[in-house]
Image: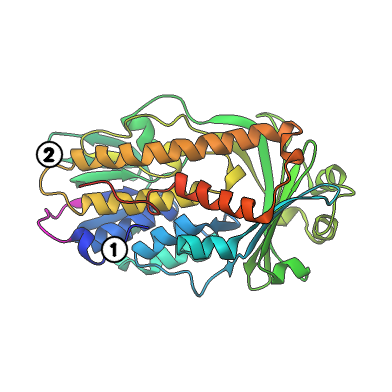
Amino acid sequence: MAKISPRQTSFAGRMETMRVLVIGAGIGGLAAAKGLLEAGHDVEVFEHAEALRDGGAAVTVWSNGTAALGQLGVSLADVGRPLHSLRSITDSGRLLWEADLADVTERLGSPTIETPRRLLTGKLAAALPTHVLHFGRRCTGVAETADRVVARFADGTSAEGDVLIGADGQRSVVRNQVLGGRPARMTGWASWQGLTRSDLPMAQGNQTVNIAGRVAHCGFIPAGGGLLHWWFDLPWQDGEPIGSVRELRRAFAGWPDPVWPLLEEIGPEDVGFFPHIRHKVPRIWGGPRTTLIGDAVHAMPPAVAQAANQTLEDAWLLSHLLGAVERHPEEALRSYECERRSRVLKVSRTAALTSAQRSTPLQRLGRMPKSIATRSQVASLRSGSTVLRPLPAT
């Protein structure tokens, strides 16, 4: 793991203080703001919602995500639930494989933690001075000149800065303004998910369980405080009806525990729905004074639960590289994109392949010893990570 901390030597030396505009107050925007403030820059975050968003069930923060947060000076020690085991079974209950996440933690130096999304964004927001956050400011346009970048908002106001970061999610206005091109593509799958306070034993444990069926998948992860994060994945095409809890009960009838007990607990108000999408990741992510992070540039299917983690890595590396800027930021922005693109592409392709294989018998045939599954998890996390590998030269 890289040992440089944004609070120590990574931002030392000569540096030109910049005014940085961040569009979006999700995980990526808040994390980037934290790192850039630590670097000594003047940062403002603009969010279209009227308050910090608190939806989105829970987030699996893998070792690379907790490492990035640690480098940004944010700890999850007092929120969520540490995970010690990742288990995959079939819809008949047959074990496919199990990875020892406690061993993964020891090998990589950072834990895996499941936490409600609202607690993660709350942690990041609490680390920022209140004057940094501006709510009810919907970005409608971005314009760059030789020496400035301007963000325009729906209320008729605007803001000027030296750099602008688009952290405004999969429907990014910033991406559309600076890159154009098509939006993310549907993958043909969707999730019905939620975060429920539950008396089921799994909600009190430290194990995540994925269950693979012939035409459906589901999973369960304890998120701390008796909360259980759950999801049910089914094929779905744009324009089809969303489906109901009753239909989920029919689709997953006869599956092993805790499927049926959980489905009996939940009602329509507990279920969130989102289609799986994937962006084509461009080579360049912005202009001379703009760039993108997270779902704004590399939205991916949730099959490997890495979207938030890759976003945190984006925020950490961008903060590090902009912390060393002496003059024009473009070289730092392109260096950030080059390094992150190579990692993100690996993760996005793995997620897409894993999602595509759900319609084949391949995922239900795999059986491997625990030691091999654990080493495979370590290798996969390292391969798609920047923070768990040596930093590029600046």
Q: Is residue 57 visible?
A: yes
Residue 229, position as x, y percentages in the image: 66, 59
Q: Are marks 1 and 2 in contact (CB under 8 Å)?
A: no
Neighbourhood count class around disc 1 (C-alpha, 10 Å): few under 14, some 14–19, many 20 upward: some
Vertical side of 197 occupied by 230: above or below? above
Q: Is residue 124 left or right of residue 262?
A: left
Residue 137, position as x, y percentages in the image: 36, 50
Residue 211 is inside the magenta segment: no
Q: Which residue is mark 2?
A: 147
Q: Which residue is mark 1?
A: 5
Q: Residue at x 57, y 48 (%)?
A: 376
Q: Residue at x 33, y 60 (%)?
A: 133
Name which quarter of the figure residue 56 lies in.
Answer: bottom right
The quadrant of the picture occupied by the N terminus is: bottom left
Q: Residue at x 33, y 34 (%)?
A: 285
Residue 15 is inside the magenta segment: yes
Q: Main secondary structure of the magenta part?
A: loop
Q: Nearer the viewer, residue 10 or 117?
A: 10
- What stretch of residues is rendered in magenta? 12-19
Vertical side of 261 occupied by 183: above or below? above
Label total for image: 2
Q: Nearer the viewer, residue 125 or 224?
A: 224
Which tag is nearer the camera, tag 1 or tag 2?
A: 1
Q: Check disc 1 and give the amino acid type.
A: Ser
Q: How is the image coloured?
A: rainbow
Q: Check disc 2 and give the amino acid type.
A: Asp
Name which quarter of the figure residue 213 lies in.
Answer: top right
SS label for mark 1: loop
Residue 377, position as x, y percentages in the image: 57, 51
SS label for mark 2: loop
Neighbourhood count class around disc 2 (C-alpha, 10 Å): few under 14, some 14–19, many 20 upward: few
